[in-house]
Image (spheres, helix red, strand yellow):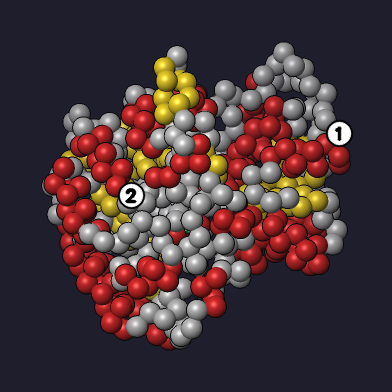
Amino acid sequence: MTVEQFDPSTINSAQSQTTTLDIPSKMIEEQSQRSEQLANANQSVERTAKIGFLSLGCPKNLVDSERILTQLRTEGYDVTNSYNDAELVIVNTCGFIDSAVQESLDTIGEALAENGKVLVTGCLGVKKDEIIELHPNVLGVTGPHAYDEVLAQVHEHVAKPVHNPFIDLVPPQGVKLTPKHYAYLKISEGCNHRCTFCIIPSMRGDLDSRPVGDVLGEAQRLVKSGVKELLVISQDTSAYGVDVKHKTDFWDGMPVKTHMQQLCEQLAKQGVWIRLHYVYPYPHVDHIIPLMRDGKILPYLDIPFQHANKRILKLMKRPGSSDRVLERIAKWREICPELVIRSTFIVGFPGETEEEFEELLDFLEEAQLDRVGCFKYSPVEGATANALPDHVSEEVMEDRLQRFMEVQARISAEKLQARIGQEYLILIDEITELGAVGRSYMDAPEVDGKVYLTDEFDVKPGDQIWVQIIHADEHDVWGVRVED
Ligand code: SF4
């Protein structure tokens, strides 16, 4: 199990879990490698307009970065990992928690010091005044998913490069910042809920579902480009299409509803791993479980439960009802015994009593969740929960976090021990000097465990091989290759 920084976006998100996808230098380096590949393939195009790009935060922000980069490349701009070479630097910020805000502000400061011409976009962009107060020399500030505004600001400061329209600078799947074999598929923006610990709706607005035909088209292009795993992300995947009343769109000449179930059924036809994140346990999720049982999508559900006590959930204004959650989990497992459930929880929410916390521990024991992240409550600026009485002291929160971790670490270790001797299909992520490292259907990238294959070098990232598990700890497993 993992202890993660408090981040409401991951809360309904797994990942931002500030989720560690970020590492700006890494992003920019990977992007640069891809730019190099593209550059080699398009030598006759004169490109002098180079843009630096730094992407911080969660997978949703990463997808925004990919869209901006794709548009920049489409227009003929080049992307560089060097402050010196860049004519301008774009910083795509994260602004959910204090440490993310600080990292974003520091990154803007560094880009200003190293390059001098900086555009700021992303979640922290909604606090334009704060950014300008600290960094008055930034050239422009926009909020999240403001693709057109960012491009317009780039045009203002760096003239569009000479571009031969007959040479395609961008691969059909667009520019991707994830490894070639997996990709995030963002199906909607924003959120209609108003969880009291979260400021995402004020940053990203209400739910805005992408047309299902667009989503499926993107999925197909990604698969054609070699992607083996699609990770469906949003703020609330179960709510997909609610804003457009689940209207019918078209894909491949066929009518398809803008609805989670129909989306999953169509994605299943792509023949790659489909992993669902940020699923709320609404009743219609029951209809997704048979797709998992039948091997159409991965039997993996990322459901941010946050708590188990009714009063706390009410104070949190969580969507969906906590009633009968355990019953529903049991029913899902009956239908699909392979189902793996990942979740995130908050301990020390304002007013949480010792008894209510113990109810959460009891829930953990009963629910036997496979992957769990835990956050101490953090008063995100602007969150309505901050006004609630009886905030829990740091000391008590820390104590509860440790007790929570102990329980979940034991559960996780027991569950992984039970995997020893079994065989799983593993998707290889990387080759290290010790061997290959991959994941099974039970592990999402960045947030879950890994499968280590010591001394296995006869594979490459993106390969899928069968592996027998021979050892496990609380989080990861070790295995050996077996014949297909
Ligand atoms: S308000 Fe929306 S985005 Fe924020 S935690 Fe709640 S469901 Fe998730």
**x then y, percent, for residue 81:** 69, 44
| Amino acid on which disc 2 is placed | Tyr
- Position of residue 266 relative to residue 191, above or below, is above
**x then y, percent, for residue 404:** 31, 73
Identify the residue position indicated by label 2 in the image: 282
Which residue: 43% across, 75% down?
349
Q: Quadrant of the N terminus?
A: bottom left
Alpha-carbon span between mark 2 and mark 1: 49 Å
- Position of residue 357 relative to residue 197, above or below, is below
| Amino acid on which disc 1 is placed | Ala
The numbered dot on residue 159 is 1
Dot in front, 2 or 1: 2
- Position of residue 73 relative to residue 445, above or below, is above
Which residue: 83% across, 36% down?
155
| Of pointers 2 and 1, the one earlier in the residue sequence | 1
Which residue: 53% across, 35% down?
210
- Kindly tell me whether mark 1's CB lies below 8 Å from ligand 1: no
